[in-house]
Amino acid sequence: MAAGRRTVLAGGAVALLAAGGLGGAAWHDHRRDQEEDASAAASGSAASAGSSGSAADAEARAGIQRLLDARAAAVLARDQQALADTVPDAAQALRDSQAAMLANLAQVPVASWSYTVQRLDAFPLPPVLTGVGGTDPRRAVQVEFGYRLSGFDSVPVTATQYLTAVRQPDGGWLLSSDSDRPGGAVQLWDLGPVTVVHGRSCLVLGLRGQSTLQAVADQADRAVPAVSAVWGRSWGERTVLLAPLASDQFGRLLGVDPLAYASIAAVTTGELGPAEAGRTERITLNPQVWDTLNALGRRVVTTHETTHVATRAITEQWTPRWLSEGAANWTGYLGTGRTPRQIAPELFADLAAGRVPDALPADAAFDGSATGLPQAYEQAWFACRSVVQRHGEPRLVALYAAVAAAGGSGGQDAAVDSALRRTIGLGLTAFTAQWRGDLLTAARAKA
């Protein structure tokens, strides 16, 4: 998963299906990453521990932070020489890669750029000749990298990087490597020159041609008002989309095996809860799937992902995936003219064969390796459709917010049960029975 606090968020949603006439099979993935939350917490603990270490550690931390501040200032000033001055003369490959990164950023509207030392001696270093007195002059540093995009982030987007700093004879520090420990976050500008397209309410950063990125921006601009029409206008009404050129780049950006995402058209990354209001989620397109979609397919996927951006501040760890993904699919398909049977062909096939689900799909049903993955997404869409058909669309929005407000101390089912009772007057058991009844009624209908 993406390193640092920015994670591939909870869910997994079949945004559209080939059987629906939208192009290639395209799934959305939006998975919660509990491991990342634990990693972030561990990083914070390590940083606190390091700050109370030896005087030598404190001195090294301060010196390395000064080095990182100089690097950040050089990037913001687009000063290639100043950036090169933070790297030893002998590390020519690193100097070259840093110069390339700076050139790749030329069009990106960066408002802030920072590095913060989180932990010293964070990973084992490859052996080298030691310095004077037999000591190793290097320190393995875990760093929190943060940046803001002008007009889109009021607080930084953060990620974890792993760097090696080397002490100089004069006591200063330089960066000697950014590759001694694999697993740090990869940004789009690490992969090639970034082309930027500014939409009315979106920013598209890509490694693809201008015309391709403009088409993405046009679709994103149409998605924003469509989502606001359902979810209101308090979410910022802006999106940032990343468009890598190849599936391996998609995998590197997210820190995942691209083969495991071979049917996924787009992924939204970010943080759960209201703290996310200050930044705009990143929607990353998977070119291997995106390029197979027709215009309607791209519309559904983009609107689905934009819904996740709009609802992120009211999505919590206890929000069930059937609700978050069903709501996004409900919004994605609005106004498309698709019938329930076209939107949920696998589900209706199961119903015709007498396979009626006993319960709303569990979170695990949305995992990429789960059996019956399309049905899980279709069942989730139908559950949200049931709320809207019986109680109106505002009640679906109210239900979503009520689940977040319920808190997770009593568990997911308790939060959902409480929210359902407050918004539509039914508990979870009664709502599930009603949903099953609506499925059977729809299965008997001809349309």
Image (cartoon, rainbow, N blue to C red):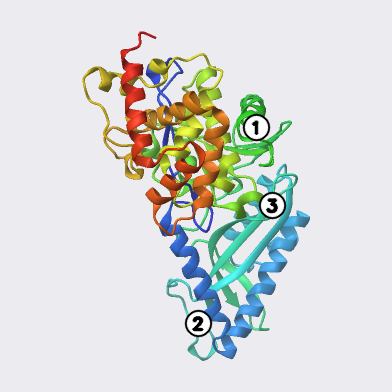
Query: Label 3 near label 1: C-beta < 8 Å?
Result: no
Q: Which of marks 1 and 2 is nearer the N terminus?
A: 2
| Label 2 environment density (alpha carbons within 10 Å; few <14, some 14–19, many ≥20) | some
Q: Which of marks 1 and 3 is nearer the N terminus?
A: 3
Residue designated by label 1: 228
Could you say where residue 71 lies in the image, as x and y percent from the top left?
69, 64
Q: In this rendering, does residue 225 appear at all? A: yes
Residue designated by label 2: 136
Asked if 268 appears above or below 158 in the picture, the reply is: above
- Residue 92 bears which disc, if any? none
Q: Is mark 1 on a helix, strand or loop?
A: helix
Could you say where residue 31 lies in the image, as x and y percent from the top left?
43, 45
Residue drawn at the location 40% of the way across and 57% of the way down: 410
| Label 1 environment density (alpha carbons within 10 Å; few <14, some 14–19, many ≥20) | some
Answer with the quarter of the image where residue 283 lies.
top right
Q: What residue type is labelled 2?
A: Asp
Query: Label 2 near label 1: C-beta < 8 Å?
Result: no
